[in-house]
Image: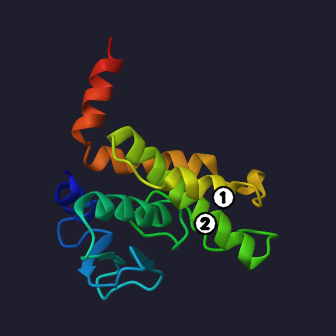
Amino acid sequence: MDWDRLKRAVELDGKRRNAKGMVRIMEAALGYGRAGDVHHRRDAAGRFVIRINSNHDAPTKWATLVHELGHVYCGHCGRHERGWWPDRRKLPRMHQSMQDDIREFEAEAVAWIAASRAGIETKSTEYLAAKVAPLDNERVDVDAVLQAANHIESLAPTAALRAFRADDQF
């Protein structure tokens, strides 16, 4: 499982000579009802803080981290001075509950793309199917989702993804 590899790569993403990376990952016992979260407020070093439930197995941690990174890289938590994504904390002309639904849909779509290409089974398909019907699909930023998934894959490609890309070369 590539959980530790992805975690290290994410923490190094955007690191500069005298600055830490853009994301800090903490494992904490969050109980069994919560897989993880990302904080909109940053730590003292200016990093987004993602908490992952330490009670979960490695594949669940991996999928949770990718979902939470989806929030960061789709701009749901704002920009970072070393980041490439826009600030999408507020989606224009939309009720707050619809904004929340779109943000969750986008983050889970990132997780589904990355997990399915890495050969990791998740419950993303069911979750996305339940969320898509009430959404204003024109407001979902497909480009943000694809860029986020691609960036995550580029940080720490899994063995399955490396094999997929090697097969794709022919």
Residue 164 at x, y percent in the picture:
32, 27
Task: Report the residue that reaches farthest toward the right.
Answer: 93
Residue in the picture at 46% in, 66% down: 72
| Pair 1/2: label in front | 1
Q: Nearer the viewer, residue 21 or 159?
A: 159
State the CA–CA distance, disc 1 to disc 2: 14 Å
Pick the quarter of the image with the C terminus.
Answer: top left
Left of 109 or right of it: where is 138? Answer: right
Mark 1 residue element: helix
Residue reaching furthest top? 170
- Residue 14 in sight in this render: no
Which is more toward the observer, 130 or 136? 130
The answer to which quarter of the image holds residue 29 is: bottom left
Mark 1 burial class by Cα count in 10 Å: few <14, some 14-19, many 20+ = few
| Residue type of the residue flagged with mark 1 | Ala
Q: Which residue is mark 1?
A: 130
Q: Is residue 118 left or right of residue 87?
A: left
Note whether 146 is above or below 107 in the view shown: above
Give the residue drawn at x 17%, y 60%. Answer: 4
The answer to which image quadrant residue 9 occupies is bottom left
Residue denoted by label 2: 103
> Residue sitting at 73 percent across and 78 percent down?
96
